[in-house]
Structure formats: structure tokens, C-alpha cells
Image: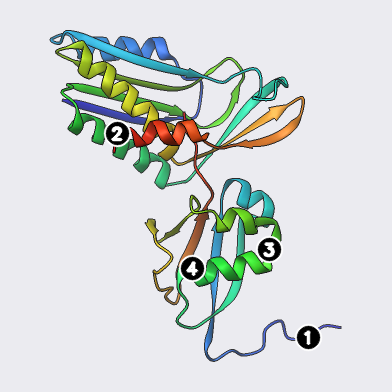
Amino acid sequence: MARAPHAPQSAGRRVKIGFYGRLAQAIGPKVEVDIPAHSRVGDVRRILAEKFPGGAATLASGRSKACVGGAIVGDEQMVSEGDEIEFLPPVSGG
Amino acid sequence: MSIVARLEGKRLRPDLELAALVAEAAGDGAVVSFTGIARPRSSGGEAVDVLVLEHHPTLTQKSLEDIAGAAAERFDVTHVRVVHRFGEVPAGQPIVFAGAASPHRRSAFDAADYLMDRLKTEAIFWKRETGEAGSRWIEPTETDYSDRERWD
């Protein structure tokens, strides 16, 4: 049955997340998720791991990095309204 | 001093890159270069047809520049040149060229070694082999990571 896709969440926010490599294969190149207000990047990482079990192991890897606004950031970084977050699985050149 | 850090979407020509580096280094005593080639076999021995290198629209170029710039700063070199493929690289074709010129050979060897150890573990690419065994993501080995740590 059709219904409103999202209940109003006065305290939460919806953010866009991009993925690359094996994470893009497991989850998709882009998704949107609802996160609580005052979330940090590490919180988003955990929410994604729960929502997309196929990417959980890679997201949990210490070698998977997060990028916000074109810069690599740590898990303690606060997520602001309108942020686009990217998760980069372990990289490998050469 | 010159630093070249370039992403290449089409065939990489190590012969031309080396010629350019040698021409730049005309006043120096040494040029050392490394060319990485897509292997025709996986680590498990299966035939590999193509290596696919995904990259990030902004971070990949920046990672090449950061690594090349760090080599230029760290070693007694006059020219550093890094060219890296992205996209589909058929087995047997070059993936990466890393070279350095210096007044003396030791610095050029060290700079090329350093460039490759960092490119293997820190350049922003995601590699996937496709072939006989299907498609498989390739990540740095523990040896690659420990080789990188030698420079810390």
C-alpha cells in the first residue's frame, strides 16, 4: 500500500552517501539515509553497516576512509546539514 | 625542479615518459624509473584479461600530487614524474610509471622506491581483476603495507 515515504523527523536529517570500489558494488554508488541530529561520521558508518550488511566488514575496516567536502576526515567529525559523505574502501594503486 | 603527476585514461607509454624525464634531466647524473604492468595471472594463478582501476573525481589526482611532491621534498632529486592509468587496462599493458632524476644515483633509486611504496598503498584507486575466475577486488598485501612503513 502506498504511503508517505518518510515520517517527519524533527531531530533527524537525511544525508547523501557515496561509495567506491567494493563498497559501491555491495551497496550501490549512492544512497540517502536518515541519521539522528548531532551524528558523527563514525555513527553514520555504524548506521550504514547495520542497514547494508554486505558492506559491513569493509566499512568496519580501519583502512576504509571517509571523505566530507573533498577532504578525508576522521570518525569524530560532526555531520552537518547538507554534507555529502563518501566512504572509500582500502585503496590500491600501482 | 619539476614535478609531473598525471592521470592517464588511455594507453600509458613508459618509453615516452622516460624520454621526457631524461630530457628534463639533461643536467643531472641519474634517472631511475619503474613501470608497473598489469599481470596476466591472478595471485591464485587464474588468467586475468583486464585490470579495472576505478578512481575518485578529485582525490585521486590530489593523491598523486601529494606523493610526487613528498618525494621531491624528501630526496635530493631534481625531477619527479608519476603517471598512473585509470579505467580498463588489458593484461600486459602498463599501469604506472614512476621516475626520478638526481645528480647522483642513490637519491634517484630511493625516490623511485618511495614513490612506488606510497602509490601501492595510498594512491586513491580501487583495482579489480576480471578474467577466468570472474571479477575480484585487489587490495595491498601486508608486505605492501610494511614496505610503506619503512619510510615513516
Find disc 3 in the rendering and name its residue.
Answer: A52
User: Contact, CB < 8 Å: mark 4 with mark 3?
Assistant: no
User: Contact, CB < 8 Å: mark 3 with mark 2?
Assistant: no
Q: Chain of mark 2?
A: B
Q: Residues within 10 Å of mark 4 (few under 14, many from 20)?
A: some
Q: Give the Cα separation between the discs numbered 2 and 4.
A: 29 Å
Q: Give the Cα separation between the discs numbered 1 and 2.
A: 58 Å
Quadrant position of the N terminus of chain A in the picture: bottom right
Q: Amino acid at mark 3?
A: Phe
Q: Amino acid at mark 1?
A: Arg
**Residue B28, numbered label:** none
Front disc: 1 or 2: 2
Residue B18: image location, x then y, percent? 34, 12
* Direction from residue B103 to residue B121 in the image, left or right: right
Front disc: 3 or 2: 2
> Is A88 rendered above or below residue A76?
above
Front disc: 4 or 1: 4
Residue B41, image quadrant:
top right
Q: Chain of mark 1?
A: A
Residue at 55% in and 63% down: A17
Q: Chain of mark 4?
A: A
**Residue A3, numbered label:** 1
Residue at 61% in and 52% down: A23
Find disc 4 in the rendering and name its residue.
Answer: A42
Q: Amino acid at mark 2?
A: Trp
Dot 4 or dot 1: first in sequence order is 1
Q: Are marks 4 and 1 on the same chain?
A: yes
Label 4, secondary structure: give it. helix
Dot 1 or dot 3: first in sequence order is 1
User: Contact, CB < 8 Å: mark 4 with mark 1?
Assistant: no
Find disc 2 in the rendering and name its residue.
Answer: B151
Q: Amino acid at mark 4?
A: Gly
